[in-house]
Image (cartoon, grey):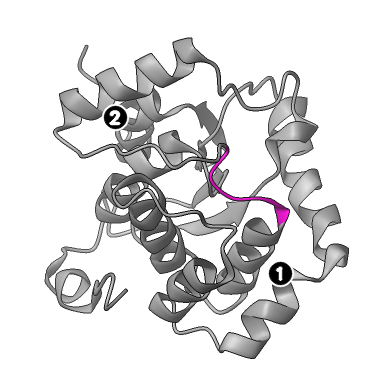
Amino acid sequence: MGHVIDLDQRRMQRARWTVPGGRRPRVGCIFEVGSPWTYLSAERIDRQFAGVRWQPALPAAMPGGARQDDVARIAAERRARELRLPLVWPDRLPAGSREVARVAALAGEFGRAATFVLAAGRLAFCGGFDLDDTDVLIEAAAAAELDRDAALAAAADARRDAGLEAAGRWVASRGGTELPALVVNGMLFCGEHRLAEAAAAGLGVRARA
């Protein structure tokens, strides 16, 4: 596998997303790194919002966990067609275990979670690669400019699970049932289908139907 993703040029050209008066909304994204819904929404979130705080979560801590049944697959495939994005299913779902989520948390500590999420999503859902394969995981970590040994150490560090589980419980405690979840100026928007509504909330206007 070669170079996966380079966002630097696009980010330099991207206008900074602000609210009236020049203030940026406070935005957080709580996500499951191996979810097709994270893959389908991550790049749009990165384009629409500046300064996002990306927080990986373990959805098993939420009621029902993450759906991976045939109905969920069909819905994801339909949405991918609507967005004109490729969607290749990896053999293993969810596409990434606790180890992958731990590395995502490490990337977040260095402000590189967005790059890691985008790289991991493309590897899993464009290439069909198994994120639990060490070589594939290191490829995603390299895209986020993470040190290889640090990424492997993070993947093996079970102490990180408490924070990942707490993020899932936090969403559930506020009535959320699915990821990704966006927090915009204190308001919670759960699910890929609510991105436009979240963006409108940040601007202080109503989303169009």
Residue 171: quadrant of the picture = top right
Q: Which residue is mark 2?
A: 196
User: Residue type at mark 1?
Assistant: Ala
**Residue 179, numbered circle:** none
Q: Is residue 48 left or right of residue 13?
A: right
Inspect this view and state whether residue 88 appears: yes
For mark 2, does the 10 Å Cα neighbourhood hold few (<14), some (14 to 19), or many (20 or more) residues? some
User: Residue type at mark 2?
Assistant: Ala
Decide: is 37 above or below 53. Answer: above
Front residue of 136/181: it is: 136
Q: Which residues are magenta?
A: 94-98
Name the quarter where the N terminus is drawn.
bottom left
Q: Is residue 48 left or right of residue 34?
A: left
> In the image, which is nearer the foreground, mark 1 or mark 2?
1
Q: Residue at x 51, y 37 (%)?
A: 180
Q: Which residue is mark 1?
A: 155
Residue 25: image location, x then y, percent: 41, 51
Magenta stretch secondary structure, dominant: loop
Residue 153: image location, x then y, percent: 74, 80
Name the quarter where the C terminus is drawn.
top left
